[in-house]
Image (spheres, rainbow, N blue to C red):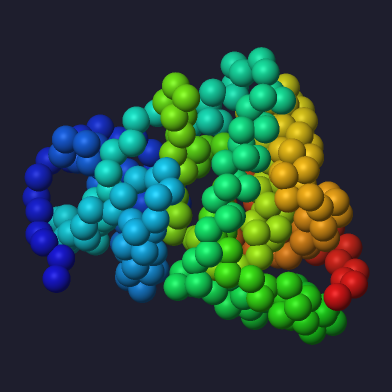
Amino acid sequence: MKEKFSTHIGELIGESGTAKVHHWQKNEVIKIFKSTFPLHAIETEKNIGLLLNKTNLNLPKLIQSIDYLGDTALIYEFVPGKPLGEVLLTEENVEKSAKKFAEIHYLLHQNDSAKLPSQKKQLEWYIAEMKHTLGTKLKAFSDFISAHTSQNQLCHGDYHPLNILIDGDKYSVIDWNGCSAGNPLIDVSWTHLTLNSPAIAPQFGQEMADKMVLYATLYLKFYCEMAKIETQEVLKFHPISALRRLSDNINNKSAISMYENEWLLEKINSFAPTI
């Protein structure tokens, strides 16, 4: 049963389309979900947090679930640091940073996490949601997913520079609510696609967009070297990642939709699987 609190929250640390994160008590933060966010999704995030607490990963530990002024909230360990995405704004050694970014992701993927939500089921849900967009490609997408999601490796689901906190030589990976057990190359595909988004230039400037394209190229190169695979083994999953991202844009009425959706549709329409 959730405890009830009315303690005054601290300063706002971050905000997404689903929740706000504030300082809470000493060495803790509170994640307060918006009323439109479904309770079952919050419960899923709590259960994921409890499972991840048992690992040795560098991530904020889940402390408890509470009722805060009528809203469901989760209390996490506070981890100091700046988002890698902010550090990159002034980072000159992009290659060194991209290599570390790839290394963190690769090491994360070495964990077996069969008890986490199934990546296959997650992607099957997206395919069902987007069946009208897929049209005649629906079966091909379904077959492709079935053929490539038998693994049980830990996948973050939304691995990008804003979800990595850097504090000197220390790092912590945050925002695990979409993680799953599945194929790590699909996870890498999502990251690579996200770093190449055409929404970056209008929001952060062309210089930052160019830096992210370079960063994405280097990240993929280093990851594939560590995994001993060719880059095409990751790029073939771009249409799957694009489908998921398009669905999120539509369902969340994302502000970046105007910059991304046509580009994502092109990725989806380019799908020509070789299972």
Q: Seen in the image, is 95 located left or right of residue 120?
A: right
- Percent from the top left, x then y, of residue 75? 24, 51
The structure residue drawn at horizontal position 27% and vertical position 44%, both measured from the top left corner, is 77
Q: In which quarter of the image is residue 238?
A: bottom right
- Percent from the top left, x then y, of residue 91? 61, 18
- Percent from the top left, x then y, of residue 234? 78, 55
Q: Quadrant of residue 220?
A: top right
Q: Is residue 10 above or below residue 16?
A: above
In the picture, the quarter occupied by the C terminus is bottom right
- Percent from the top left, x then y, of residue 244? 65, 63
Q: Seen in the image, is 149 located left or right of residue 164?
A: right
Q: Nearer the viewer, residue 89 or 187?
A: 187
In the picture, the quarter occupied by the N terminus is bottom left
Q: Which of 99 and 122 is in front in this view?
A: 99
Q: Seen in the image, is 85 located left or right of residue 270?
A: left
Q: Is residue 120 above or below residue 196?
A: below
The structure residue drawn at horizontal position 65% and vertical position 40%, both measured from the top left corner, is 102
The structure residue drawn at horizontal position 45% and vertical position 73%, both measured from the top left corner, is 115
The structure residue drawn at horizontal position 45% and vertical position 54%, both measured from the top left corner, is 176
Q: Seen in the image, is 22 located left or right of residue 119?
A: left
Q: Which of 82 and 115 is in front in this view?
A: 115
For the question of whether residue 196 can be seen, the reply is no
